[in-house]
Image (cartoon, grey):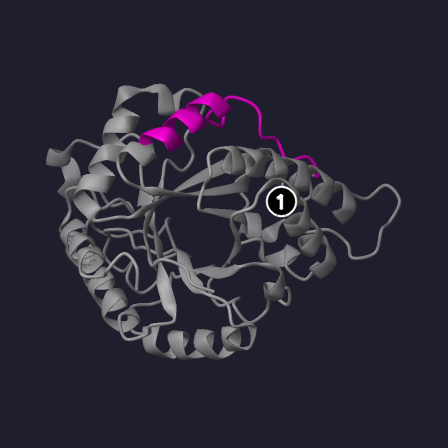
Amino acid sequence: MHMDYIKGFTFGWMSGKGAFRKPEAKESLRLLAERTGSSHVIFALAAHQDHPQAVEVKYRGDHLVEDDELVDMIRYARTLGLQVILKPTVNCTDGTWRAHINFFDIDVPCEPKWKDWFRSYTAFQQHYAAIAEQEKCEMFIVGCEMVQSERRDQEWRDVIAAVREVYTGLVSYNTDKYQEGHVKWWDAVDVISSSGYYPIRDWEAQLDRIEREIAPYGKPFFFAEAGCPSRSGSAQVPNDWGLEGEVSSEEQTRFYEAMFRHVSQRHWVRGFGLWDWSAHLYAEKDALTDDGYGVYGKPAERVIQQFYQGIPTQV
Protein backbone atom coordinates (compact mmCIF):
# COMPACT_ATOMS: atom_id res chain seq x y z
CA MET A 1 0.00 0.00 0.00
CA HIS A 2 1.34 3.45 -0.90
CA MET A 3 1.29 6.23 1.67
CA ASP A 4 2.72 9.71 1.19
CA TYR A 5 5.62 10.49 3.49
CA ILE A 6 4.15 12.19 6.57
CA LYS A 7 6.06 15.39 7.23
CA GLY A 8 3.87 16.04 10.22
CA PHE A 9 3.43 17.91 13.47
CA THR A 10 0.97 17.39 16.32
CA PHE A 11 -1.03 20.58 16.91
CA GLY A 12 -3.14 21.92 19.75
CA TRP A 13 -2.78 19.14 22.34
CA MET A 14 -4.86 19.82 25.48
CA SER A 15 -6.74 22.65 23.77
CA GLY A 16 -9.97 23.33 25.61
CA LYS A 17 -13.32 24.75 24.54
CA GLY A 18 -12.88 27.94 22.55
CA ALA A 19 -9.11 27.56 22.04
CA PHE A 20 -9.39 27.11 18.28
CA ARG A 21 -11.72 30.12 18.00
CA LYS A 22 -8.94 32.47 19.08
CA PRO A 23 -7.06 34.27 16.29
CA GLU A 24 -3.71 33.20 17.79
CA ALA A 25 -4.61 29.52 17.15
CA LYS A 26 -4.91 30.09 13.41
CA GLU A 27 -1.80 32.23 13.46
CA SER A 28 0.01 29.39 15.24
CA LEU A 29 -1.10 26.87 12.60
CA ARG A 30 -0.03 29.26 9.85
CA LEU A 31 3.42 29.56 11.44
CA LEU A 32 3.63 25.77 11.75
CA ALA A 33 2.99 25.37 8.02
CA GLU A 34 5.28 28.25 7.06
CA ARG A 35 8.27 27.47 9.28
CA THR A 36 8.56 23.70 9.60
CA GLY A 37 8.05 22.41 6.06
CA SER A 38 5.23 20.20 7.31
CA SER A 39 2.85 18.54 4.85
CA HIS A 40 0.56 17.07 7.55
CA VAL A 41 -0.97 18.25 10.80
CA ILE A 42 -2.22 15.87 13.49
CA PHE A 43 -5.05 17.27 15.56
CA ALA A 44 -4.74 15.32 18.82
CA LEU A 45 -7.78 15.58 21.09
CA ALA A 46 -7.72 14.78 24.80
CA ALA A 47 -10.95 13.34 26.17
CA HIS A 48 -11.11 12.74 29.92
CA GLN A 49 -11.77 9.87 32.25
CA ASP A 50 -11.59 10.34 35.99
CA HIS A 51 -8.92 7.71 36.73
CA PRO A 52 -7.46 4.57 35.11
CA GLN A 53 -10.31 2.33 36.30
CA ALA A 54 -13.13 4.68 35.26
CA VAL A 55 -15.35 3.33 32.48
CA GLU A 56 -16.72 6.61 31.11
CA VAL A 57 -14.76 8.50 28.45
CA LYS A 58 -15.91 12.12 28.50
CA TYR A 59 -15.59 13.97 25.22
CA ARG A 60 -17.99 16.83 25.78
CA GLY A 61 -17.13 19.75 28.04
CA ASP A 62 -14.72 22.57 28.60
CA HIS A 63 -11.65 20.30 28.28
CA LEU A 64 -12.10 19.81 24.52
CA VAL A 65 -12.53 22.08 21.53
CA GLU A 66 -16.08 22.00 20.24
CA ASP A 67 -16.90 20.17 17.01
CA ASP A 68 -17.55 23.31 14.96
CA GLU A 69 -14.24 24.93 15.94
CA LEU A 70 -12.39 21.70 15.17
CA VAL A 71 -14.04 21.55 11.73
CA ASP A 72 -13.20 25.22 11.15
CA MET A 73 -9.54 24.54 12.02
CA ILE A 74 -9.41 21.48 9.75
CA ARG A 75 -10.72 23.63 6.90
CA TYR A 76 -8.19 26.35 7.70
CA ALA A 77 -5.42 23.71 7.59
CA ARG A 78 -6.57 22.87 4.04
CA THR A 79 -6.11 26.51 2.97
CA LEU A 80 -2.50 26.21 4.18
CA GLY A 81 -1.98 23.15 1.98
CA LEU A 82 -1.84 20.72 4.90
CA GLN A 83 -3.14 17.17 4.94
CA VAL A 84 -5.04 16.33 8.11
CA ILE A 85 -4.84 13.43 10.58
CA LEU A 86 -7.33 13.20 13.43
CA LYS A 87 -6.19 11.54 16.67
CA PRO A 88 -8.75 11.38 19.49
CA THR A 89 -7.16 10.06 22.66
CA VAL A 90 -7.86 10.13 26.39
CA ASN A 91 -6.22 11.45 29.56
CA CYS A 92 -6.94 10.48 33.17
CA THR A 93 -7.83 13.62 35.11
CA ASP A 94 -6.10 12.26 38.23
CA GLY A 95 -2.80 12.58 36.36
CA THR A 96 -2.22 8.87 35.68
CA TRP A 97 -0.78 8.27 32.21
CA ARG A 98 -3.30 6.61 29.87
CA ALA A 99 -1.01 3.61 29.37
CA HIS A 100 -2.17 2.45 32.82
CA ILE A 101 -5.91 2.32 32.01
CA ASN A 102 -6.65 -1.28 32.95
CA PHE A 103 -9.32 -3.70 34.20
CA PHE A 104 -9.58 -7.34 35.29
CA ASP A 105 -9.47 -9.81 32.42
CA ILE A 106 -12.33 -11.75 34.03
CA ASP A 107 -15.56 -9.89 34.77
CA VAL A 108 -16.21 -9.64 38.52
CA PRO A 109 -19.48 -8.31 39.95
CA CYS A 110 -19.15 -4.81 41.43
CA GLU A 111 -15.82 -4.23 39.64
CA PRO A 112 -15.36 -1.98 36.57
CA LYS A 113 -15.23 -3.94 33.31
CA TRP A 114 -13.41 -3.78 30.00
CA LYS A 115 -16.70 -4.09 28.11
CA ASP A 116 -18.10 -0.93 29.69
CA TRP A 117 -14.93 1.07 29.07
CA PHE A 118 -14.69 -0.10 25.44
CA ARG A 119 -18.37 0.73 24.86
CA SER A 120 -17.74 4.31 25.97
CA TYR A 121 -14.40 4.55 24.15
CA THR A 122 -15.94 3.26 20.90
CA ALA A 123 -18.70 5.89 20.98
CA PHE A 124 -16.01 8.53 21.46
CA GLN A 125 -13.97 7.22 18.51
CA GLN A 126 -17.01 6.96 16.23
CA HIS A 127 -17.99 10.54 17.00
CA TYR A 128 -14.67 11.87 15.71
CA ALA A 129 -14.42 9.33 12.91
CA ALA A 130 -17.65 10.80 11.51
CA ILE A 131 -16.05 14.26 11.53
CA ALA A 132 -12.92 12.83 9.89
CA GLU A 133 -15.10 11.34 7.14
CA GLN A 134 -17.10 14.54 6.65
CA GLU A 135 -13.89 16.56 6.30
CA LYS A 136 -12.08 13.86 4.29
CA CYS A 137 -9.17 13.63 6.74
CA GLU A 138 -6.33 11.60 5.26
CA MET A 139 -5.92 9.42 8.37
CA PHE A 140 -7.62 8.56 11.64
CA ILE A 141 -5.63 7.30 14.65
CA VAL A 142 -7.87 5.21 16.94
CA GLY A 143 -5.79 5.49 20.10
CA CYS A 144 -2.45 6.41 21.63
CA GLU A 145 -0.15 4.60 24.05
CA MET A 146 -2.90 2.48 25.62
CA VAL A 147 -0.33 -0.09 26.70
CA GLN A 148 -2.28 -2.10 29.30
CA SER A 149 -5.29 -2.35 27.00
CA GLU A 150 -3.40 -3.62 23.96
CA ARG A 151 -3.68 -7.25 25.05
CA ARG A 152 -7.46 -6.96 24.54
CA ASP A 153 -7.17 -8.12 20.95
CA GLN A 154 -10.85 -8.58 20.05
CA GLU A 155 -12.01 -5.33 21.64
CA TRP A 156 -9.48 -3.32 19.67
CA ARG A 157 -10.49 -5.09 16.47
CA ASP A 158 -14.07 -4.11 17.29
CA VAL A 159 -13.10 -0.45 17.84
CA ILE A 160 -11.37 -0.38 14.45
CA ALA A 161 -14.37 -2.04 12.77
CA ALA A 162 -16.70 0.53 14.39
CA VAL A 163 -14.52 3.37 13.09
CA ARG A 164 -14.56 1.85 9.60
CA GLU A 165 -18.37 1.85 9.67
CA VAL A 166 -18.27 5.65 9.48
CA TYR A 167 -14.80 6.49 8.10
CA THR A 168 -13.30 5.41 4.77
CA GLY A 169 -9.74 6.79 5.03
CA LEU A 170 -6.55 5.26 6.42
CA VAL A 171 -6.76 3.93 9.99
CA SER A 172 -3.78 3.69 12.34
CA TYR A 173 -3.11 3.05 16.01
CA ASN A 174 -0.25 4.76 17.90
CA THR A 175 1.43 2.29 20.26
CA ASP A 176 4.00 3.46 22.77
CA LYS A 177 7.79 3.29 22.51
CA TYR A 178 9.16 -0.25 22.93
CA GLN A 179 5.69 -1.80 22.36
CA GLU A 180 5.75 -2.22 18.56
CA GLY A 181 6.18 -6.00 18.83
CA HIS A 182 3.49 -6.52 21.47
CA VAL A 183 0.41 -5.47 19.47
CA LYS A 184 -1.04 -8.63 17.91
CA TRP A 185 -3.76 -6.90 15.89
CA TRP A 186 -1.67 -4.78 13.49
CA ASP A 187 -3.31 -6.69 10.64
CA ALA A 188 -6.55 -4.78 11.43
CA VAL A 189 -5.09 -1.31 10.71
CA ASP A 190 -3.80 0.22 7.48
CA VAL A 191 -0.79 1.94 9.01
CA ILE A 192 1.35 1.00 12.03
CA SER A 193 2.57 3.85 14.20
CA SER A 194 4.38 4.35 17.48
CA SER A 195 5.82 7.04 19.74
CA GLY A 196 9.49 7.49 18.89
CA TYR A 197 10.88 8.75 22.19
CA TYR A 198 14.13 6.79 22.06
CA PRO A 199 17.38 7.75 23.81
CA ILE A 200 19.64 9.67 21.47
CA ARG A 201 22.29 6.91 21.36
CA ASP A 202 19.83 4.05 21.00
CA TRP A 203 18.19 4.83 17.66
CA GLU A 204 20.07 2.26 15.57
CA ALA A 205 19.25 -0.63 17.89
CA GLN A 206 15.61 0.40 18.25
CA LEU A 207 15.11 0.86 14.51
CA ASP A 208 16.60 -2.59 13.91
CA ARG A 209 14.16 -4.06 16.43
CA ILE A 210 11.09 -2.21 15.11
CA GLU A 211 11.87 -3.21 11.53
CA ARG A 212 12.01 -6.89 12.54
CA GLU A 213 8.81 -6.70 14.58
CA ILE A 214 6.60 -4.98 12.02
CA ALA A 215 7.99 -6.71 8.90
CA PRO A 216 5.54 -9.66 9.02
CA TYR A 217 2.56 -7.31 8.63
CA GLY A 218 3.71 -5.61 5.43
CA LYS A 219 2.15 -2.30 6.47
CA PRO A 220 3.44 1.28 6.20
CA PHE A 221 4.97 2.62 9.42
CA PHE A 222 5.55 6.10 10.84
CA PHE A 223 6.30 7.70 14.19
CA ALA A 224 2.98 9.31 15.15
CA GLU A 225 4.86 11.07 17.95
CA ALA A 226 8.54 11.93 18.41
CA GLY A 227 10.32 14.86 19.98
CA CYS A 228 12.44 16.12 22.84
CA PRO A 229 12.17 18.96 25.36
CA SER A 230 14.82 21.68 25.21
CA ARG A 231 16.25 20.72 28.59
CA SER A 232 19.58 19.29 29.71
CA GLY A 233 19.38 15.50 30.00
CA SER A 234 16.23 15.19 27.88
CA ALA A 235 17.97 13.60 24.89
CA GLN A 236 18.55 10.51 27.08
CA VAL A 237 14.89 10.29 28.19
CA PRO A 238 12.92 12.31 25.62
CA ASN A 239 9.59 10.91 26.89
CA ASP A 240 10.09 12.38 30.39
CA TRP A 241 8.32 15.74 30.26
CA GLY A 242 8.84 16.17 34.01
CA LEU A 243 12.63 15.78 33.94
CA GLU A 244 14.47 18.40 36.00
CA GLY A 245 17.13 20.20 34.02
CA GLU A 246 18.45 23.50 32.71
CA VAL A 247 16.97 25.09 29.60
CA SER A 248 18.97 23.80 26.61
CA SER A 249 17.91 24.38 23.04
CA GLU A 250 21.19 22.65 22.06
CA GLU A 251 20.03 19.42 23.69
CA GLN A 252 16.81 19.47 21.67
CA THR A 253 18.71 20.27 18.47
CA ARG A 254 21.14 17.39 19.01
CA PHE A 255 18.26 14.98 19.53
CA TYR A 256 16.52 16.00 16.29
CA GLU A 257 19.75 15.86 14.31
CA ALA A 258 20.49 12.35 15.59
CA MET A 259 16.94 11.06 15.08
CA PHE A 260 16.74 12.37 11.52
CA ARG A 261 20.23 11.08 10.69
CA HIS A 262 19.34 7.53 11.76
CA VAL A 263 15.82 7.47 10.32
CA SER A 264 16.90 8.90 6.96
CA GLN A 265 18.73 5.61 6.32
CA ARG A 266 15.53 3.60 6.92
CA HIS A 267 13.19 3.94 3.99
CA TRP A 268 10.49 1.89 5.71
CA VAL A 269 9.94 4.75 8.18
CA ARG A 270 7.31 6.85 6.40
CA GLY A 271 7.34 9.99 8.49
CA PHE A 272 6.62 11.72 11.77
CA GLY A 273 3.90 13.47 13.75
CA LEU A 274 6.37 15.51 15.80
CA TRP A 275 5.53 16.48 19.38
CA ASP A 276 4.34 19.17 19.51
CA TRP A 277 3.16 22.60 18.38
CA SER A 278 0.90 24.55 20.72
CA ALA A 279 -2.26 26.36 19.63
CA HIS A 280 -1.09 29.23 21.84
CA LEU A 281 2.60 29.90 21.17
CA TYR A 282 5.02 31.59 23.54
CA ALA A 283 6.44 34.88 22.21
CA GLU A 284 9.28 34.18 19.77
CA LYS A 285 11.61 36.42 21.80
CA ASP A 286 11.11 33.99 24.72
CA ALA A 287 11.92 30.86 22.68
CA LEU A 288 15.33 30.25 24.22
CA THR A 289 13.92 30.42 27.76
CA ASP A 290 11.27 27.76 27.01
CA ASP A 291 12.23 24.24 28.11
CA GLY A 292 9.28 22.33 26.62
CA TYR A 293 8.77 20.20 23.50
CA GLY A 294 7.90 23.19 21.36
CA VAL A 295 10.40 24.16 18.64
CA TYR A 296 8.97 27.54 17.59
CA GLY A 297 11.85 30.01 17.29
CA LYS A 298 14.41 27.45 18.51
CA PRO A 299 17.34 26.02 16.49
CA ALA A 300 15.53 22.66 16.18
CA GLU A 301 12.88 24.38 14.06
CA ARG A 302 15.44 24.90 11.29
CA VAL A 303 16.68 21.30 11.60
CA ILE A 304 13.12 20.05 11.11
CA GLN A 305 12.45 22.40 8.19
CA GLN A 306 15.63 21.34 6.42
CA PHE A 307 14.84 17.64 6.92
CA TYR A 308 11.23 17.96 5.77
CA GLN A 309 12.08 20.15 2.79
CA GLY A 310 14.66 17.58 1.68
CA ILE A 311 12.01 14.89 1.29
CA PRO A 312 9.77 14.83 -1.79
CA THR A 313 6.10 14.83 -0.82
CA GLN A 314 5.49 11.65 -2.82
CA VAL A 315 8.30 9.16 -2.34
Q: Report the span colored magenta.
A: 55-76
Vertical placement of 311 versus 214: above or below? above
* 241 inside magenta stretch: no
Rendered location of residue 90, percent (x, y)? 55, 41
Rendered location of residue 169, percent (x, y)? 51, 48
Rendered image quadrant of residue 75 = top left
Rendered location of residue 165, percent (x, y)? 66, 43
Q: Secondary structure at mark 1?
A: helix
Which residue is rendered at x = 40% and y = 38% of the image? 13
Vertical placement of 22 versus 48: above or below? above
Which residue is rendered at x = 20% and y = 64% of the image? 257
Left or right of 304: which side holds 162?
Answer: right
Q: Could you tell me which quadrant the C terminus lies in?
A: bottom left
Which residue is rendered at x = 36% and y = 57% of the image? 4
Q: Which residue position holds label 1? A: 163
| Nearest to the observer: residue 139 or residue 296 | 139
Question: Can residue 93 be seen here?
Answer: no
Left or right of 92: which side holds 165?
Answer: right
| Nearest to the observer: residue 113 or residue 310 | 310
* 64 inside magenta stretch: yes
Mark 1 belongs to which amino acid? Val
